[in-house]
């Protein structure tokens, strides 16, 4: 690497390099947080789906070292080389296939180390075995400790970390905003179609809270008996499969280069959005028109719900742009051409779908699985009113997600140039100010 920055081994920059316990943790429903590789992605720690262990096993897993604020965790395999930094206030222990790094603050800024480890220069060292000239799938401790880290003066490190951190802080704020917006949409769906609040209010002779007369008129004022118990009058108990049109996916021949690297996003489970981002607007792989025409995949319209149905089942996404998908997924279109009602209907039953999935090799959600769940289906007018009301909220979520993508691209462009010393701090600061304005 051409650089004005001197280099030091990772081991020399750390107070601690501690491998995780190699035993599998005892999993519990609550207790102490256990970090798992699935929680570490893109330099972030995502604990929206945490895992836990009990007091005895927690104590055993922190004997070598208890993670503390500012420590860095790096994954050794499956995947290899992903990193995150422990935030303040988190009490946790390492899971499996992880290593704890404690930066020496007199030698290296912790956030700078976090970014340095994500740089292509370091990632190439991680993934390449110089002794055999081949790629590797496991990051051994001696290799980790010997990683060559560009180490400018610590004040420069802090400026680099500050510039990149400003972008990540903006991304974090957008994600928090999306979480708030998505909670609003979830709450409205639950109020209307799970708790039946407007119907209950009208039954008591009251105007539904926060609802105008035109929207209120779309809801009945009484309940009737059904096989699902009391349901709003005129709403239909039916199978979930009857409320949707199911679209299958497919994979163009990977051996045919004419089918790949085109302009059409091609969704697989790895493209599933973070919990509150809802939409998928870009994918890892793209295909061509020829790839669509010569395979069983189809173009999904904007607003199609995608559910992963084989292997890793139950991952949801809402298409933010037209796209295709692989055969391990279903596309779900509402019978009244709705988007958001179908998405939130699916999200309400996804845990049941996962429990009902079956297969000789992989868990699988089939069309029969979709037909096997009973739901209460509202009138088309109530469904459309819901979609219309939350459309601005969902569009804001999508816009924020697109902004996150742009900011991430800028960060990822700046990162290697800053770590290598090819880009000076004033230039970087200007780019960051323009990006976060």
Image (cartoon, grey):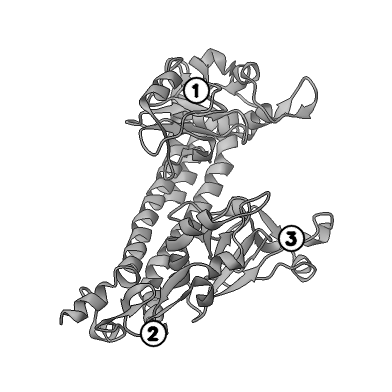
User: Residue 33: where, in percent of width, then height?
Assistant: 40, 33
Q: Residue at x 57, y 56 (%)?
A: 357
User: Residue 435: where, in percent of width, then height?
Assistant: 46, 50
In the rendered structure, the answer to whether residue 60 lies left or right of residue 304 reads: left
Label 3 vs 1, first from the N-terminus? 1
CA distance for labels 3 and 2: 37 Å
Q: Secondary structure at mark 2?
A: helix
Residue annotated with mark 2: 381
Question: Which numbered disc covers residue 100?
Answer: 1
Q: Residues within 10 Å of mark 2 (few under 14, many from 20)?
A: some
Q: Is residue 67 visible?
A: no
Q: Residue furthest left?
A: 205
Question: Which numbered disc covers residue 251?
Answer: 3
User: Residue 200: where, in percent of width, then height?
Assistant: 22, 75
Q: Residue at x 54, y 70 (%)?
A: 371
User: Residue 183: where, in percent of width, then height?
Assistant: 34, 59
Question: Would you say the residues marked 3 and 2 are in contact, meaning their CB atoms lie under 8 Å apart?
Answer: no
Q: Secondary structure at mark 3?
A: loop
Query: In the image, is residue 82 above or below residue 143?
Result: below
Label 3 vs 2, first from the N-terminus? 3
The front one of 56 and 307 is 56
CA distance for labels 2 and 1: 55 Å
Q: Residue at x 61, y 18 (%)?
A: 141
| Quadrant of the rendered image containing residue 390 | bottom left
| Quadrant of the rendered image containing residue 136 | top right
Q: Residues within 10 Å of mark 3 (few under 14, many from 20)?
A: many
Looking at the rendering, in which quadrant would you find the N terminus?
top right
Q: Secondary structure at mark 1?
A: strand
Question: Would you say the residues marked 3 and 1 are in contact, meaning their CB atoms lie under 8 Å apart?
Answer: no
The front one of 311 and 427 is 311
Of tags 2 and 1, the one toward the viewer is 2
């Amino acid at each position: 690497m051409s650089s004005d920055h001197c280099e030091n081994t990772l081991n020399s920059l750390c107070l601690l390099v501690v491998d995780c316990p190699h035993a599998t943790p005892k999993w519990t429903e609550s207790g102490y947080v256990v970090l798992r590789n699935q929680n570490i992605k893109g330099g972030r720690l995502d604990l929206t789906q945490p895992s836990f262990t009990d007091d005895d096993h927690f104590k055993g897993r922190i004997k070598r070292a208890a993670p503390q604020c500012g420590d860095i965790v790096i994954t050794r395999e499956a995947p290899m080389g992903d990193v995150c930094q422990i935030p303040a206030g988190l009490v946790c222990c390492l899971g499996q296939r992880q290593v704890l790094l404690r930066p020496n603050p007199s030698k290296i800024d912790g956030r700078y180390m976090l970014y340095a480890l994500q740089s292509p220069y370091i990632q190439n060292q991680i993934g390449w075995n110089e002794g055999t000239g081949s790629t590797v799938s496991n990051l051994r401790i001696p290799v980790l400790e010997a990683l060559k880290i560009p180490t400018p003066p610590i004040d420069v490190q802090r400026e680099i970390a500050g510039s990149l951190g400003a972008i990540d802080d903006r991304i974090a704020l957008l994600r928090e905003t999306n979480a708030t917006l998505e909670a609003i949409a979830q709450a409205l769906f639950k109020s209307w179609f799970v708790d039946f609040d407007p119907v209950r209010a009208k039954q008591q002779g009251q105007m539904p809270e926060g609802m105008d007369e035109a929207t209120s008129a779309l809801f009945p004022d009484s309940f009737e008996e059904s096989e699902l118990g009391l349901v709003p009058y005129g709403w239909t108990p039916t199978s979930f499969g009857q409320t949707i049109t199911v679209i299958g996916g497919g994979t163009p021949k990977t051996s045919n280069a004419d089918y790949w690297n085109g302009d059409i996003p091609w969704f697989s489970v790895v493209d599933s959005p973070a919990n509150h981002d809802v939409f998928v607007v870009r994918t890892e792989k793209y295909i061509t028109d020829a790839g669509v025409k010569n395979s069983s995949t189809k173009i999904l319209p904007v607003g199609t719900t995608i559910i992963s149905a084989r292997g890793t089942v139950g991952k949801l996404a809402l298409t933010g742009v037209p796209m295709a998908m692989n055969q391990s997924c279903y596309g779900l279109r509402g019978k009244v051409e709705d988007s958001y009602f179908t998405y939130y209907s699916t999200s309400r039953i996804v845990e049941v779908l996962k429990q009902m999935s079956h297969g000789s090799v992989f868990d699988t959600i089939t069309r029969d699985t979709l037909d096997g769940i009973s739901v209460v289906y509202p009138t088309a007018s109530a469904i459309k009113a819901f979609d219309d009301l939350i459309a601005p909220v969902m569009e804001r979520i999508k816009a924020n997600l697109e902004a996150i993508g742009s900011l991430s691209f800028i960060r990822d462009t700046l990162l290697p140039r800053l770590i290598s010393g090819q880009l000076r701090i004033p230039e970087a600061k200007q780019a960051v100010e323009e990006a976060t304005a």
